[in-house]
Image: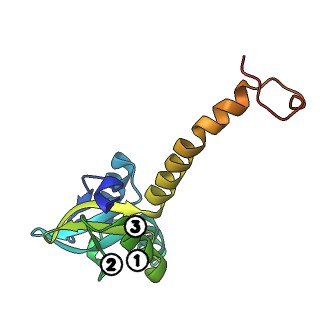
Amino acid sequence: MKVSDVMATPPVCVAPHDPLVEATRLMAQSGVGSLLVVEEGALRGIVTDRDIAVRGMGGGLTPETPVDAVISAPVTVVDVNDDLQVAYQTFRRTGVRRLPVLNAGEAVGVLTIDDLFLDVLRRLADLLGPIAWSVLREPPGPPPQGGASVEP
């Protein structure tokens, strides 16, 4: 499976000179906890809600301070065509929770730890679904003699 199968698209982006208050508004409107910081098509970094809270407001910066003051850069990325195993290894190696996804140098998505977790849960549900339904169809109580399942 590829990164492109699990990543969130399109990425929500902000310019480095945009104020922190605008970045916060954009996060709230988009329902995301991070924004890619892009300038002239090039990825400059990433800013998270935690960056704004801790480095920005907690650091005494004003809401009008440019996003550039609190971004995390350089940023670790994965390629849209990378196998998910590469993403797992990158998350494990770096300890980050979000990876911008690039295609020919352009930001095309974001892959998060949560995306991978949900993918694993979906796969587990697909695998266990038939087993769970067969268990639910069995009548309550001890299994019949011989241990064979009783079909209704």
Q: Is residue 145 above or below residue 21?
A: above
Q: Which mark is residue 22?
A: none
Q: Mark 2 or mark 3: which is in front? A: 2
Q: Quadrant of the C terminus?
A: top right
Q: CA distance from mark 1 to mark 2?
A: 8 Å
Q: For this view, does 76 lie left or right of residue 42?
A: right
The amino acid pointed to by label 1 is: Thr
The amino acid pointed to by label 3 is: Thr
Residue that label 2 marks: 76
Q: Tell me the residue at 45%/79% (across/down).
A: 59
Residue that label 3 marks: 48
Q: Specify which label sits upstream in the sequence, 2 or 3.
A: 3
Q: Specify which label sits upstream in the sequence, 1 or 2.
A: 2
Q: Which mark is residue 90?
A: 1
Q: Is residue 98 above or below residue 130?
A: below
| x and y percentages locating residue 52 in the rendered image | 41, 69
- Estimate how packed mark 1 is, as few (under 14), some (14 to 19) or many (20 or more) residues with alpha carbons within 10 Å: some
Q: Mark 1 or mark 2: which is in front? A: 1
| x and y percentages locating residue 83 in the rendered image | 33, 67
- Estimate how packed mark 3 is, as few (under 14), some (14 to 19) or many (20 or more) residues with alpha carbons within 10 Å: many
Q: Tell me the residue at 56%/43% (across/down).
A: 125
Q: Tell me the residue at 50%/49% (across/down).
A: 123
Name the residue nearer the viewer: 78 or 27: 78
Q: Disc 2 on helix, strand or loop? A: loop
Outermost residue, front side: 146
Q: Tell me the residue at 39%/48% (across/down).
A: 31
